Image: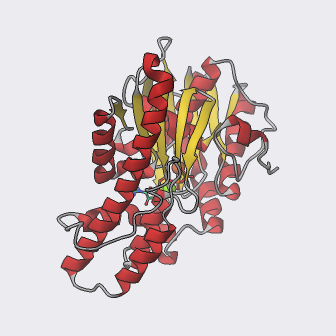
Amino acid sequence: QTVLGLETSCDETAAAVVRRHADGRAEVLSSVVGSQIAAHAPFGGVVPEIAARAHVESIEAIAEAALKEAGLGYGDLTGVAATAGPGLVGGVMVGLSFGKAVALARDLPLVAVNHLEGHAVSARLGADLPYPFLLLLVSGGHCQLLEVAGIGACRRLGSTIDDAAGEAFDKIAKAMGLPYPGGPELERLAEGGDPTAFELPRMLLGRKDCDFSFSGLKTAAARLAEGVTHEADRRNLAAAVQEAIAGQLAEKSERAMKAYAQAHADAGLRFVVAGGVAANRTVRARLEAVAQKNGFSFAAPPMAYCTDNAAMIALAGAERLAAGISDPLDAVARPRWPLDAAAAAAAPTHK
Ligand code: ATP
Ligand code: MG
Ligand code: FE
């Protein structure tokens, strides 16, 4: 399979070519990400109308750049995979429509990919990672623990009851006056800070489930941010926030590991973190330590495939095609689209 992947669900216009070899190994032939950060920065966040327009303006050039970088033409492809949701529907429709046009013109199978399934397979881009695995998906809009048995076979063990982890990073960073997108800025500011200098609420740690909550932390951190002006204090607050988020992610992941280990001991114990927040080094280190302690191997995508990209979409498409799954050319864009099958059936669609 040689698949063109297209990603336009948020503020990145991305295209990539991924080859899936017969033995299941994935090879990224190219991955091009056109960021719209400069267009949205003045507004402190993503503006949907600006995003959709920017996707329209750049999708064709970015797809062609991905093909060129791979040294291929449209005629060399065996399939097209486009994100069909969840995300900002105006943007999703741009990539999905472009994918449909390529599929129609070149008589190629189309795969309408769930963006979260892309994140779920993204660690398979960098290393030999067999199914099944326990996944912590931590992105700008999602924070979930999932049991991933194979492509299209996910079961949710827990999720956030309010904000996503990336959203918490972004909102607290904004309250501290850092530019958008806040997650990486907050990580930079936290360097050398003392995480014990501030006391922050530790949410839901007493609860026995695998759910997350970040709203209390967000409120507390925003209130503290108002009184903090000295650079050293700002560094300490950033470090404390990062530590609190990483700590909760590790705590709940450990809880999920214990439950997962009972059911999957003979299939091998693998723990994977994916999504934009997986780029955070403190988060990675805390999770790796907890995986090791519980007898799990640890994997995370290469840094470039943590945040949104099209290589993960192409790989999800290639794996679906290899499993004999493709979608009709009238596949719809879905602003909401949960990853686990039971919930997905009940989700609304959008023409
Ligand atoms: P979703 O995938 O849920 O639809 P999204 O596509 O916007 O959301 P991603 O692109 O996967 O999310 O990740 C972006 C998020 O990751 C942002 O919230 C960003 O702040 C966060 N992030 C990226 N790098 C870091 C980092 N180094 N530390 C903390 N957070 C980070
Ligand atoms: Mg993004
Ligand atoms: Fe994403």
Relative image position of residue 9 (x, y in whole percent): 61, 52
Residues 76 and 89: in front is: 89
Residues 27 and 288: in front is: 288
Q: Residue at image x 76%, y 47%?
A: 347
Does residue 10 sit above or below 130 in this rendering?
A: below
Residues 240 and 209: in front is: 209
Q: Is residue 312 visible?
A: yes
Query: Where is residue 293, by image quadrant?
Result: top left
Relative image position of residue 62 (x, y in whole percent): 53, 46
Query: Where is residue 327, by image quadrant?
Result: top right
Q: Is residue 125 visible?
A: no
Does residue 306 sit above or below 244 in this rendering?
A: above
Q: Residue at image x 70%, y 30%?
A: 110
Residues 196 and 139: in front is: 196
Numbered circles on residues, count: 0
> In which quadrant of the rendered image does the N terminus lie?
top right
Relative image position of residue 70 (x, y in whole percent): 45, 31
Relative image position of residue 174 (x, y in whole percent): 43, 75
Does residue 215 sit above or below 20 in this rendering?
A: below
Q: Residue at image x 55%, y 55%?
A: 160
Q: How is the image coloured?
A: secondary structure
